[in-house]
Image: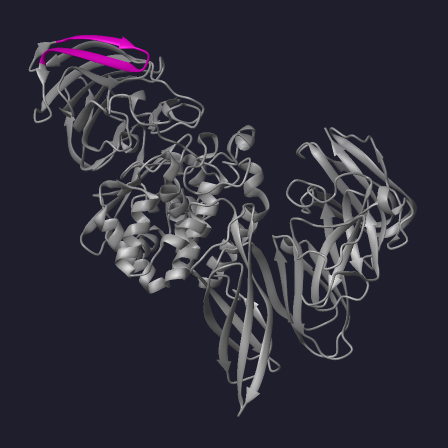
Amino acid sequence: MKYFFAFLLLLFLTSRLSAQCNHRHGFAHSAAADSVDALHYIIHLQAIDFTAKTIQAETTVRLRPKLAISTIPLELKALQVSAVFMDQQPLSFTQSGDMLHIMTGQLFHPNDTLELTIHYSGQPFHESWGGFHFSGNYAFNLGVGFESDPHNLGKAWFPCVDDFQDRATYEVLITLPEQMTGIAGGFLADTTHHANGNITWHWNLVQPVPTYLASAAAGTYALSASIFNGMEQNIPITIYTRPIDSLKVAGSFANLQQIAAIFENRFGAYPFDRIGYTGTAIGAMEHVCNISYPNSAISGNLTSEYLLTHELSHMWFGNLVTCADAGDMWLNEGWATFCQYFFKHDLYSPDIYRNEMNANHFDILKNAHIVDGSYLALKNVPTNYTYGTTVYDKGATVVHTLMNYLGQEVFFDAVKAYLQTYAYQHASSENLRDFLTNHTGLDMGPFFDTWVFTPGTPHFSIDSIHTTAENGNYTTTVHLKQKHKGYNHISTNNILEITFIGAGWQLHTDTVHFSGQTAVSTKQLDFEPLFAMADYYDKTADATTDISGVIRSTGELSLPTLNTKIFVDALTDSAFYRMTHHWAAPDSLKTAVNGLRLSPYRHWEFKGIFPQNTTMRGRFFYANSSTLDGSLILSEQDSVVVLYRENPAADWAMVPQTREGLWNIGYVVIHDFKPGQYTLAVWDKQLVGATDLRLQTNINYLTIEPNPVTDEMAIKWNDSQDGFLSIIDSTGKIIFQQAVIQSGSLVVDARNWAKGWYFAELRNKNDQMIGYQKIIKQ
């Protein structure tokens, strides 16, 4: 489920939720579900008053008791019941809060089936997102709300067993003036024209679904209809929009047929009777056959294609099979988020999928534990973070890793079988684990223990390789190391790709299977490897981010996702490089140094094949923000440095370097950048003295007026310069950059910046730092 709140900035901090327009929602066990099981609903919205924002309705529910019972509990929120009937006989009832208690006057047992008809009216409940909404002459429901607790909001428009494990079939009837359209899930069974100028739209949903997936929408809609030639049957496609949006449908949904075909090929036949999208003022919500889709996403282009894809994939993940409880929401939302990336693998190219999943993975490693309050497991996420970054975005990376752990062919075959086995039911993480184990013959317990049931992220690295040659063949022993980001855990039954590279840049990739903190694997190669790279093709979303490539000329190489930049000063031929940002603590000093602390959070590794006489400089960004170095740089007493070692056998040591910046944000430039490992560290000035001669510093300050700033500020410097001024946030992202030509000042508008601290830097045309200053945004 997703929502499209680009215009509601104030919801950003509520849920990270609008960063990728994801609506997070949750479920709780219904107060009625212990007593009764709903089988079928007939919901008739008999009158909708768009001015008063009220409805008048009647719902007939067929149900079966789960125990001997004479009083039937149902849930209904805000609306007032006027009468209840069974077998055309009126029954007594009470309403208290969200509960409706119906006194039948007789005892019913689990084998009995009864039908109750409830008449009710009033102004339906809604919150900022979920519930039953009015927007001008349009009305629609969104099946869940993220402010409500519990979040299920079927009860916002009909009396029900509002529990996502309780599945029923539905008939929805909507009576409106002739010029208006009523839309619900399933297929259109009938339309009835009345003598008073009204029309009743009658929809049937014959597949059983939970209440939060039932829907209704009403308004003046234009229909764009087509047919999808599915693998088992022809499936109608209906896209209902405001008339002013109808010409935008072709551009917004240009690839819908191809996307549906991709999902059928990967996950099995489309499981419902219609593919439907309905434009709504806010959304989106994966109602079965009737996705509530934000009007703003119907733009005439493919900007929101990820959103329509995410929602369509829910027809398999969440609708066909629903997660068993709120703690398993990743089975709905993590898989749908994976799908919104993976469809590009089949529709566009594997490289596009790989790049976008890598960007998502980088964001997870850097931010998920911040926005979700701590490192969380996918299973049993605390209620206030059940629908946050971990569930959606990390969930997608875990599905990506699972796909590659099993191999695509086995993975998609198993997923198809899983969806069919649990079709129109709910399933838990344990159900998925056990099914995959039985279906593939591979014990999936260790994988789920590490990736689903444990907080944080495993970290895999190659400690070293050793090669011996014999008769033109090369026996290479790989020494592996395992850590874990955010939690104390060492996983077992790991499968990791290792890629070896030779002097001629020839590549050979093989898999290693290992358990424990350290491991050894031996491979036979037909060339001598210079070094090995873990997960070269980005198939395992462990706690590393990597960039590989070829350097063909001198100049700068910017690696923003690694918080580094390389300056190539001399190069006689093309060079291959591999830079890895390890989101894990570096190995400790072999010999402790009083007053010197290494980063407990991250370090880098640089490898490559470089021609003779190559000279480079490297620049590392540091900041004492929560997403980077807040656990290392604690106060102004900490003097930041970068340490280097050629390989894990050596100890960390100082190398020539220059610091550009303040104690809490800036850069360290390594004068002679060469292959090896690098880590941030700090000298504690209280222990080693205020004068630190180990590090050359270059201090020039910009003048910022005013500082702190709320709106505009003037940035000034002493000498007129040609160069560029950049503003960098605490995560290292450049949010403003402008060239300056023979200027000594610049006015910058900061009104749209988030509150916090920033780093202003002025560099000349040779990229040399000539001034900097810290900025506080209030």
Q: Is residue 543 visible?
A: yes
Most extreme residue toward the bottom, as rendered?
Answer: 471
Instruction: List x then y, in percent, for residue 702.
Output: 86, 41
Split into 4 quadrants, where in the image is the C terminus?
top right
Q: Is residue 625 left or right of residue 510?
A: right
Q: Residue at 76% x, 56% y: name it.
A: 642
Q: Quadrant of residue 290?
A: top left
Q: Residue 10 versus residue 237: which sits nearer the camera?
A: 10
Looking at the image, residue 154 lies above or below residue 611: above
- The percent coordinates of residue 4 (x first, y second) are 46, 36
In the image, residue 631 above or below residue 130: below
In the image, farthest residue toward the front: 591
Residue plotted at (30% across, 55% down): 436
Report the span colored magenta. Answer: 91-106
Instruction: Answer with left or right where residue 643 lies relative to residue 52.
Output: right
Q: Is residue 215 left or right of residue 489?
A: left
In the displayed structure, 289 sits above or below 620; it is: above
| In magenta segment, residue 95 | yes
Q: Nearer the viewer, residue 244 or 472?
A: 472
Q: Position of residue 605 (x, y in %)?
A: 66, 62
Q: How many marks?
A: 0
In the rendered image, which quarter contains the N terminus?
top left
In depth, the one of 736 and 143 nearer the eye is 143
Q: In the rendered structure, does residue 169 fall within the stretch colored magenta?
A: no
**Residue occupying image coordinates x 8% and y 27%:** 111
Tell me the chief SS of the magenta region: strand
Q: Residue at x 54, y 78 (%)?
A: 476
